[in-house]
Amino acid sequence: MERVHNFNAGPAVLPEEVLLEAQADLFNYKGLGLSVMEMSHRSKEYQEIIDETNAAVKRILGIGEDFEVLFLQGGASLQFLMVPMNFAFDSKEANYINTGQWATKALKEAKKIGKKVHVAATSEDRNFSYIPKTWTLSDNPSYLHITNNNTIFGTEWKIDPATPADVPLIADMSSNFMSKPIEMDKYDLIYAGAQKNVGPSGTVVVIIRKSLLEQSITNLPTMLDYKIHAKNGSMYNTPATFTIYMIGLVMKWIEGYGGLAKIEQSNIAKAKYIYDAIDHSDGFYKGTVDIEDRSLMNITFRLPSEELEEQLIKEAKKAGMIGLKGHRDVGGCRASTYNALPLKAAHDLAEFMKLFSQKNG
Ligand SMILES: *Cc1c(COP(=O)(O)O)cnc(C)c1O
């Protein structure tokens, strides 16, 4: 059976090679007579899987001993809480740049546990259609939190922002993690739900600079304390063993592809097909965000009417292209073009969009 072109925003497309490898391993992993799902997380064999996944993440990002890589549960949404719990000191203000719904949720979580929050910049005035270019930190910031790619609104930070040396930069990279090289020296904590770009759902990858971790707030509830998870190698409790194994396969795939610079080239080529179809449609399609801030991962656009939007989504599905409906809170259309989306899928969607606008424009 043919596979569809999958433009889902998350859970999302995985590399075919990864799925086939997992399929081959599923029944009897490397001749051990059981699947990865059935292994003890305390076994030597599983320890090798998680160690190799951890090492591959570090190799790909070019980071070493000064960072911890953790595989936790509760998704990026639990990180909205864990970040302020661990790093928002009561004597300081937690700084946030608000670029959309996920960023709003992140800062609300800090407020909910009674932390002082300062919004250093926001793009809410134009419905989150751009990335702020300037921001003002409070006097005594505990950290600055940004959302690197705004999955729902379709904007992305193109330049990793810098903070003063004593202000940690914390980023939600759920939807663009490993989509391009990252300037890791600027970041102190990164988190990313696996289900957008690096695996199935069930795990959030957290990368923390050890010097930040050492300063974290003490006496936290066990499962919400990064130090406990770091000390136990992400195995304080049973981790999402199969998801972590799948992330390991995706890491192997990224390395086989040639690393993040190569991945980025491919992502640029894919996004270009679709943005060109939008820009060359005589206004039939309208991008919803400022051109300079357009995301490489989530391409959002509108058609002249909601009826046409529905029709496009329906006809695309018939043509084997799924996942084009915009987020339920913003409407319109959205094509997510994560790492694993083949170039041909983006090409085919662009051609489909051209024909659709000619027929209906
Ligand atoms: C999907 C997403 C989240 C939420 O992730 P969960 O794993 O469902 O908690 C948070 N932030 C961003 C940027 C996302 O794209």
Image (cartoon, helix red, strand yellow):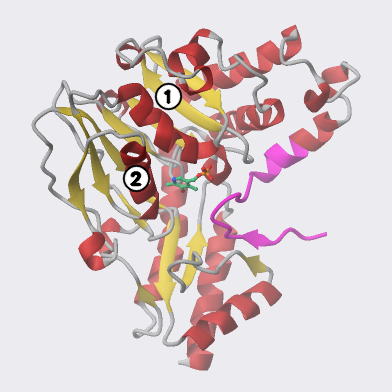
Q: Amino acid at mark 2?
A: Lys
Residue 183, percent from left and from top: 30, 30
User: What is the residue that sits farthest to the left in this orientation?
Assistant: 139
Q: Is residue 148 visible?
A: no
Closest to the camera, between mark 2 and mark 1, is 2
> Which residue range is magenta in the image?
1-21
Return the residue at label 1.
Answer: 207
User: What is the residue that sits farthest to the right in this orientation?
Assistant: 33
Q: Main secondary structure of the magenta part?
A: loop
Is 68 on the left-hand or right-hand side of 32?
left
Return the residue at label 2.
Answer: 108
Q: Residue at x 71, y 29 (%)?
A: 242
Q: CA distance from mark 2 to mark 1?
A: 22 Å
Residue 179, percent from left and from top: 44, 42
Residue 309, percent from left and from top: 51, 81
Q: Is residue 215 visible?
A: yes
Above/below status of 128 relative to 145: below
Q: Is residue 163 magenta?
A: no
Question: Who is closer to the viewer here, 290 or 62?
Answer: 290
> Split into 4 quadrants, where in the image is the N terminus?
bottom right
Q: Residue 226 appears in which quarter of the rendering?
A: top left
**Mark 2, residues whose alpha carbon is within 10 Å: few (<14), some, or many (≥20)?**
some
> Split into 4 quadrants, where in the image is the C terminus?
bottom left
